[in-house]
Amino acid sequence: MTDNGEMIVYRLGTPCGLSDIEEGKIYEAKVQGFANFGTFVYLNSRVKGLVHKSNIKTRHSEGETVFVKVLSIRINGNIDLQEVVPTRYRLETVTKQPSNIRLSELKDRVGRQVSVDVEVAQIKQTSGPTIFTVVDETGTEDAAAFVEAGVRAFPEVQLGDMVSVSGEVMMRNNRLQIEVGNISVLAGEEREAVEKRIERAIDERAQPEDLPFMVESEVLNLLKPEMQRVAKIIRKAIFTAQPIILRHHADADGITAAVAVERAVTMLIRESGGDPDAESHLFKRAPSKAPFYEIEDVTRDLDFALKDFVRYGQKLPLILMMDNGSTEEDEPSYRMARIYDIPIVVVDHHHPDESTDAFLEAHVNPYHVGGDFGVTAGMLGAELARMIYPPVERDIRHFPAVAAVGDRSEAPERPRYLDLVADTYSEDECKEIALALDYEQFWLRFNDGREIVKDILGINPDKERHRRLVKLLVSEANLAIENQLSASMPHVTEQELPNGSKLFTIDVEMYAHRFTFPPPGKTSGEVHDILCKRHAGSPVVTLGLGPDFVVIRSRGVMMNIPLMVRELRDEVIGGGVNGGGHLVVGSIKFVEGMREKVIKELITKIGEFPAE
């Protein structure tokens, strides 16, 4: 009681607990429910007590504000209360400032009240509480807020807000979670200070470790700054809970590149905390049949991303392109992604078009530093994965060797990577893994086949299953190749070009089994290998002809496929020519009605390039 006769009524602040209540004092409370023996009231969201029916003065309804005196606090934590009806009173708030900490410290604060200044990275409404995924410079965690089942808590909080969250640290399903008492959206100088603090610290945390490469390579050394830049962008996406979509070419080189990065990213996501299902909706690997980003691909990716934005309340993704993404053929899809301000980075070894860089945040490509396609995407991917998460090396050390033989690299890096793993994988074994990947991916179509691919690559712990699976797939693949070649080889035609090279053509639509392994590109490559052996020492070009495409394989002719595509596009009016690939290995597409004209002009151009 004050000197002027006012009764002091205390209002218990949100962070306060049982230890902040004193016997004999009067508190403001809200009616929570009724029982035969009395009325339950909340003094705040964490503290509940009972007013016995003998101590109730008036009739009440649920949610009504009442004033209660604390009669006693029992050893078991139960609070006995008595209703009071003051005529004159003054409210005083009992405050308890929870410790303001970083998310990495939550594990040491279980059962205690805390406060964190964080960024909201995701808002997911469940059938029960609202789950806010929050990040700071040290990690990612969830904060659960509940008003009633399925109802959005703190609707004023939006994705990307800087907020102050207070609540109790709890363990739910064996993982940390803040049970929210209050969330305040920060504004002005407060917001700016938290935003700068988190951004500065995450920027520093995202900087990859400066590791030496697994092998000596002049090209890799020159690419290192740009590779580190890509690694930093990926690490930053992980630390800020930004989803990542990894698109890659669906062959052994593209698969090894992508799976190496997939392994590093998922391991770092687990280490960084947050949603236990984060891997499923924060990372997606998707193979592309074409060696460029098709409109079909970007449409699928945008569809998934926008649905996840609505379903999970998460950010739009970072798109990572591997073993594709460097050419003009990618640009229509890039323009579509730009509408949604989606960042794109590329790690590729196809001959790049300069105009493409205008759409990219970063671009790793050996051609930028005087290298060529001999430094494969699988080599780049494995080294990039080590920058993202160094411990991943033990799982992916053999990937570059598999990529080198699978993509027929003749670069000096090839024998170095093979020597690196010679004690565990011979060159023949690497070739078998590459063939098994190509064979299985053909049947997987657009699926990533994550666990099957991990078994083929020997990542999963069952090494005996790995060996048996590779052996089986190689046997099936070789049988399919043998059947295809027995049907195709009798139909190969030959001519000599003005540059002295031998040109072989095979109609892979008419004289090869369709819709089965090997597909037209692989069939053309197998035919080319046989012809190169038969004509050792001579320049050889093999064309696999389809109704609206040509697959090109070359040895000893210094051609430039991207250049030919551009020239044919301009010169063959109405041909609808597009395509690309490496300088001497690739494919060209056109409209079927212009097939004869395009093929004739293509052969003329091949004959004009110098032959070794």
Image (tube, rainbow, N blue to C red):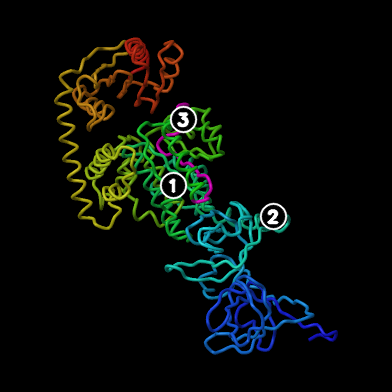
Q: What numbered label is drawn on residue 384?
A: 1
Q: Label 3 to label 2, Cα distance in Å?
A: 38 Å
In the image, the segment drawn in magenta is 312-329
Q: Is residue 73 above or below residue 508?
A: below
Amino acid, disc 1: Leu
Quarter of the C terminus within the rendering: top left
Within 10 Å of the Cα at label 2, are there few (<14), some (14-19), or many (20+) other Cα atoms?
A: few
Q: Does 85 lie within the magenta span?
A: no
- The amino acid type found where label 2 is placed reads Glu
Q: Could you say where residue 370 lies in the image, as x and y percent from the top left?
A: 46, 32
Residue name at image x 53 percent, y 79 percent: 35
Q: In front: 309, or 154?
A: 154
Residue 192, disc: 2
Report, in whole angstroms, how far the alpha carbon at label 2 lies from the one at label 1: 33 Å
The residue identified by callout 3 is 330
The quarter of the displayed image where residue 39 is located: bottom right
Number of labels in the image equals 3
**Tag 2, which secondary structure?**
helix
